[in-house]
Amino acid sequence: MSGEDLGLLLKQERGQFVDFVSAYEYKKTGGRAKSSEELSREIARVASGMANADGGTLVVGIEPDKSVTGIPHAPEELQLLVQAPQSLLLPPLHPACERIHLGNLLLLKFEIGPSPEIHRISGGRSFYRIATENPSIAPEQIQSMREGKKSFHYERQTVPDATWEDLDGEAIEAFTQKTQDSRDPKTVLHQTYHLIDGSMEKPSITMAALLLFGKNPDRWHPRCGIDFVKYEGNERQYGGSLNVVKRIRFETSLCRLIDEAVGRIKEQVRERTILHDLFFQERLEYPTFAWQEAVVNAVAHRDYALSGASAEVWMFEDRIEVRSPGLPPPPVTLEQLRSQQKVHFSRNPLLVRALTDLGYLREMGEGVPRIFREMEHHGLRSPEFSAEGFFFTVTLRNSPIYDEATLRWLNQFGASAVNFRQRRLLVYAHSHGKTFSTADYQRVGEVDRDTAYREIRALVKLGIVGPLKPKSRSYRIIEKL
């Protein structure tokens, strides 16, 4: 790796697929080099978290502020660091490791692929990468994660009949330019994204590579696109009463599919005229982020092993349904999604990493909570999640919860500052004399007393509400407008 390539890597922020580890620790008395044992365990913990999730790149010898300080350890200690993922993890992990010399400084760069197994620290815990964190996995979740990882096989399988010529060179070049990786494309797809096996003279092409960059992806997967259907009315009709208004079939490689589908579907999202401050304004019937995020997730997280079905977008008069083949993979549950828990588990980690670097996916585990916030901010009902047969469905309804005046009043408090229960309570209090009690919060928010108290205290801290009297359990809204 050249200094220029390292500079491009340092431009990236720590996140799901990139992390930096310092070889030093700093206390009030000054800095000192970490012991080789301590640094080895830190390398093993981050590497196992990435391998248990979506893979990633780990560079050792860089500070949190991205200053390059190197690894000051002796050669025999350095070998312990290189072998840490093998010697300290069960089962052993064997990531590619590159030694980078930058002047008189030495760094280690680990390229870690998503693993079909769960790796744990010897005699200790298992970790899982979510954004910049590596939380430990609860023991009761490990078996369900093992079940979920069984679906890894489909995107990782190599296709004997496929060759490098079956991939779209222009699409791959555009991809490497977007990621600012100057290496040979085969090297990039092999070492960083694990989309091909480049160890042989003839590269072995994975199904993930063919889905992402195939010239004719439907040759390898008959239903990898998106079916869009627009219906008249609120229900599907059949036979002589068939009510299909428009049908569009999107069939192209995944690196182009999302843009093509979103662009055409956007044309079908209606604008509504509303009266606002004595002026008429146009507003889309669905928040743009909400339905687009649902489409992106359907492409990234569907079960491609179910090759007889496409992802589907059904548009009715009162709702959009985004239907994805495959139920949420364990340990993700419908209840977690409905309660807006920050959960992340990729059925297709190779696809997810490439689509993230293409700009379609952002912070892992944040998409669904933001859909809730966007729908709430626009005064619409919360998204609905359901499973029927082998389809997982996200439903967005365009019927407003609040009238325009109430919504305008509510939005003074900021959608990102308060959660959906707090917003619901504020609307309740707005129509009840601008006051409420802890018992009201429990009833309206459908939560226990401790949760109600904690979330009311958050509103007090934000200056949105205040107690009616000192130590009172009744509160008033502090108007901002």
Image: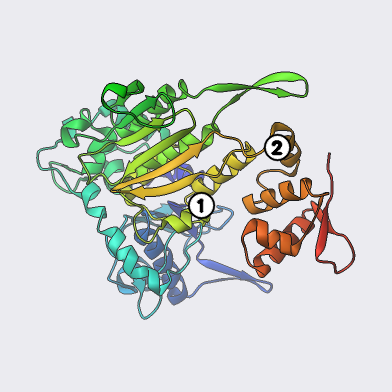
Q: Image point 67% across, 68% down: which residue?
A: 449
Q: Mark 2 points at which residue?
A: 407
Q: Name the residue under label 1.
A: 14
Q: Residues within 10 Å of mark 1 (few under 14, many from 20)?
A: some
Q: Is residue 198 at least partly visible in the picture?
A: yes
- 418 or 65: nearer the viewer: 418
Q: Classify residue 165 by image quadrant.
A: top left
Quadrant of the snapshot with the C terminus: top right
* Tag count: 2
Q: Classify residue 345 by image quadrant.
A: bottom left
Please give the label number shown on residue 86.
none
Q: Image point 43% across, 76% down: which residue?
A: 37
Image height of 84 relative to 174, above or below: below
Q: Image point 63% across, 38% down: which residue?
A: 379
Q: What residue type is labelled 2?
A: Leu
Q: How far apart are marks 1 and 2 (CA)?
A: 37 Å
For residue 62, side relative to residue 195 (left or right)? right
Of callouts 1 and 2, which one flags the residue occurring earlier in the amino acid sequence? Answer: 1
Q: Which residue lies furthest to the front in this view?
A: 240
For residue 421, side relative to residue 314 (left or right)? right
Q: Classify residue 182 by image quadrant.
A: top left
- 32 or 344: nearer the viewer: 344
Q: Image point 31% across, 24% down: which residue?
A: 242
Badge 2 element: helix
Image height of 478 relative to 85, above or below: above
x, y percentage for residue 341? 51, 57
